[in-house]
Image: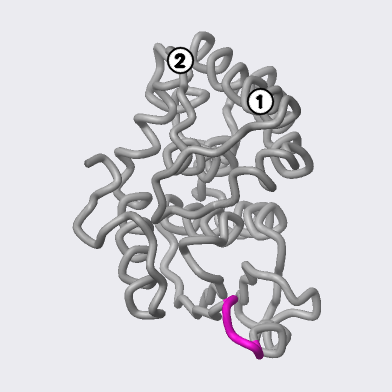
Amino acid sequence: MSLTLVIGNRNYSSWSLRAWLYLRESGLEFEEVFVSLHTDNWREEVAKYSPAGRVPILIDDGTTVWDSTAIMSHLLDRYPGAVGWPADPNERALARSISAEMHSGFLAIRETLPQNIRIRRTTTLSDVCQTQINRVQTIWRDCRERCGHRGPWLFGDFSIADVMFVPVALRFLSYGIPVPEPAAEFMRATLALPSVQDWVRTAQDEGLALGFVDNLGKGDMILG
């Protein structure tokens, strides 16, 4: 079996992060192909792998899958031991619901707080954006209050729901969004995860290699 994941810039591509994180936390070996989204021919380069023209893209023994949620569903079908959903039916329904809400919603957060791992800055929040931030924090709080006794993640053990919200935690860090307890427990779990720290380190090095200047220095670690 051969898996190849095509991703965009680590600093900016939150959906690439989700697919990559899912593969890493599932313990699946894969080849990584990087397509810079800041070149004149990036659309042509991505089109070599997928007709949708978007990253991430998974190539699994000749089968091409795009969209992070489709990639995760495909891999879970193929590898039952991959990261999945909570075992409890009620929790599984909730996890699927909040994951779908994340996939299709929170547009003001995406627009106002675009993923940029290498920055540390504050920004003016619209009422709509603040309402959506409050909603995310409520989701995290409710899940942690319900399942926190079993582990550090939204439903205790690491699940697809956590994969969906990890990039939001990184956005909150970049833009200095305060997160009250117990929702902050999810933030801490995210920032302590070795695979997330690996992604952040590579995003820093990637910026230097591509000549981007941000206000987070190479030696400034995510928890620093």
Identify residue for label 2.
Answer: 180
Along the viewing direction, whichever of 105 and 213 lies nearer the viewer: 213
Which residue type does callout 2 highlight? Pro
Circle 2 or circle 1, nearest the eye: 1
**Bounds of the magenta segment:** 37-41
- Quadrant, the C terminus: top left
Residue 101 pos. (x, y %): 75, 34
Query: SS for tag 2?
Result: loop
Along the viewing direction, whichever of 19 and 110 lies nearer the viewer: 110
- What residue do we see at 61% from left, 16% from top? 138
Badge 2 vs badge 1, beta-carbon distance below 8 Å: no
Residue 119 pos. (x, y %): 41, 52
Rounded to the nearest whole Å, what is the CA distance between mark 2 and mark 1?
14 Å
Would you call the spot at circle 1 few (<14 residues within 10 Å), some (14-19), or many (20 or more)? some
Does residue 215 lie above or below 162 as drawn? below
Identify residue for label 1.
Answer: 130
- What residue do we see at 62% from left, 71% from top? 58
Does residue 154 lie above or below 163 as drawn? above
> Residue lying furthest left in this view?
219
Residue 48 pos. (x, y %): 69, 89
Which residue type does callout 1 highlight? Gln
- Is residue 40 in the magenta section? yes
- Is residue 108 in the magenta section? no
Which of pointers 2 and 1 lies earlier in the amino acid sequence? 1
